[in-house]
Image (cartoon, rainbow, N blue to C red):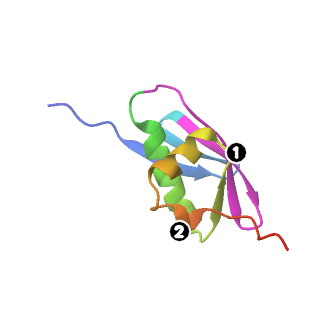
Amino acid sequence: MTDEPQVTVVDNPDESRFEVSVDGTLAGFAVYEKDRGAVIFVHTEVFEEGQGLAGQLAKAALGMVREAGKTIIPLCPYIKAYVRKHSPEYDDLLRHPAPEA
């Protein structure tokens, strides 16, 4: 019998990133900046591709942003593609620019 690996995602505000760990070992992260109630995702990196960790990281990070009542600005290509792929589930999180006057 094989035990499933324990995957966890946490916000590490001291490093300005969400981190994904497998069995307690850091496996990737999504770096962010904060700006007036928005979380700006700037870079996502996982150390071993093909395990679905980037998707788990994105889903959990976006969930934490939603729980905090914030919006997102996805500059990172991976987070941008994840949000687009899972539209309309995350559309409410997107910060849209103010209309031009």
Q: Secondary structure at mark 2?
A: helix
Q: Residue at x 47, y 53 (%)?
A: 60
State the quadrant of the C terminus: bottom right
The quadrant of the rendering that contains the N terminus is: top left
Q: Comparing marks 1 and 2, which lies closer to the viewer?
A: 2
Q: Position of residue 53 (x, y in %)?
A: 44, 37
The foreground one among 80 and 1 is 80
Q: Position of residue 98 (x, y in %)?
A: 76, 70
Residue 95 visible (yes or no):
yes
Quick check: 75 left or right of 55? right
Helix, strand or loop: magenta stretch: strand
Q: Find numbered disc 1 in the image and state the secondary structure of the residue it sits on.
A: loop
Q: Residue at x 64, y 65 (%)?
A: 71
In the rendered structure, find residue 67 and report the number of the disc placed on it. 2
Identify whether 85 is placed above or below 3: below
Picture quarter containing residue 95? bottom right
- The 10 Å Cα crowd at callout 2, few under 14, some 14 to 19, many 20 or more, is few
Q: Which residue is mark 1?
A: 15
Name the residue furthest bottom.
101
Q: Is residue 69 magenta?
A: no
Front position in the image: 44 or 20? 44
| Residue bounds of the magenta highlight | 28-49
Residue 21: image x %, image y %?
47, 39
Structural distance between the alpha carbons of marks 1 and 2: 20 Å
For badge 2, the amino acid type reads Glu
- Horizontal side, residue 37 vs residue 51: left or right: right
